[in-house]
Amino acid sequence: MSEGEAGERVCAWHASVLTLFPDMFPGPLGFSLLGQALKNGLWTLDTLDFRTFASDKHRSVDAPPAGGGPGLVMRADIAAAAIDAARARSLAERPVIYLSPRGAPFTQARARELAEGPGAILLCGRFEGIDERALFARDVEEICVGDAVLTGGEIPAMAVLDASLRLIPGVLGASESLEEESFSAGLLEHPQYTKPAIWEGHEIPPVLLSGHHGKVAEWRLDRSKAITQERRPDLWKAYQKRHAPAEQSDAKNTGAQSPNNKD
């Protein structure tokens, strides 16, 4: 990706989706802010139908799994040919991502990495998966969007694209709002409120109406910590591990500067 003098993106972020159902795209990605960004050329999209690379009259792309078992497996030659064709559509080297239940968990950090790159090639599997040889030979990264099995990779591919595209400068506009979202700082987002001040007997927390920015920030951080600890112990543990040394250091420095310190 190249940049202009003002730091703006010059080359559009390029997504290639490899699927048996190309008509599913752009789907939801063609609406709202992402759809407008697509029209404005901030990102581009092309789809490749796996069946285009079939050589028989039935356009078959799968076969029974070696060793027996239910279902069908996408053939290595079909998957590899589709990946090669997608790579040929861009001069930039884009990561090839297979949406798979056995993949590494998709994170906000990975979304940001993708947003900062030239784009991505997304491999949408069906059946019982894709021949392992194609994944190995083409250096394919496997990503999982959640601990559930879906009928195909198209919906997960849309989730990966949505999470990444919205981080591209100019797509959403307000960079400040991105910084306060869930996962951006390793915590879930704090609760949000808006008018009316009282609704069905429930009030907006008074601190949010106080106009005291420091107290508001403190309240939001405290609520983010509490919610993360309750709902995502895994994230909370990781957050504590990252911030414990700094917090201990701050406490030690504060103690050293205290007028009551006798040392």
Image: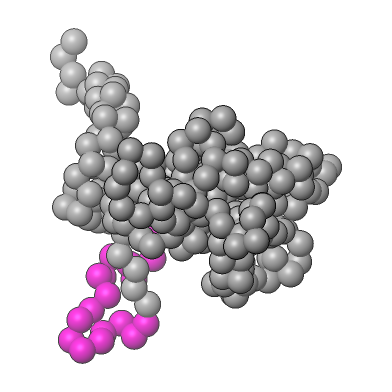
Tell me residue 158's x, y (percent). Answer: 51, 61
Tell me residue 169's x, y (percent). Answer: 65, 53
Q: Quadrant of residue 79?
A: top right
Q: Quadrant of residue 33?
A: bottom right
Q: Which part of the image, by quadrant, shows the C terminus?
A: top left
Q: Is residue 223 above or below residue 107?
A: below
Seen at 54% across and 50% down, the residue is: 123
**Which range of residues does the magenta coloring cover?**
195-217
Seen at 50% across and 33% down, the residue is: 133
* Identity of the residue furthest to the right in this view: 5
Tell me residue 117's x, y (percent). Answer: 65, 41
User: Residue 7: in sight, yes or no?
Assistant: no
Residue 230 part of the magenta segment: no
114 vs 142, nearest the viewer? 142
* Identity of the residue furthest to the front in this view: 57
Q: Quadrant of residue 37?
A: bottom right
Seen at 49% across and 61% down, the residue is: 154
Q: Is residue 98 above or below residue 178?
A: above
Tell me residue 6's x, y (percent). Answer: 79, 46
Q: In the shown orientation, is residue 170 left or right of residue 229?
A: right
Residue 208 part of the magenta segment: yes
Q: Is residue 35 above or below residue 123?
A: below
Q: In the shown orientation, is residue 126 left or right of residue 32?
A: left
131 vs 169, nearest the viewer? 131
Q: In the shown orientation, is residue 94 left or right of residue 143?
A: right
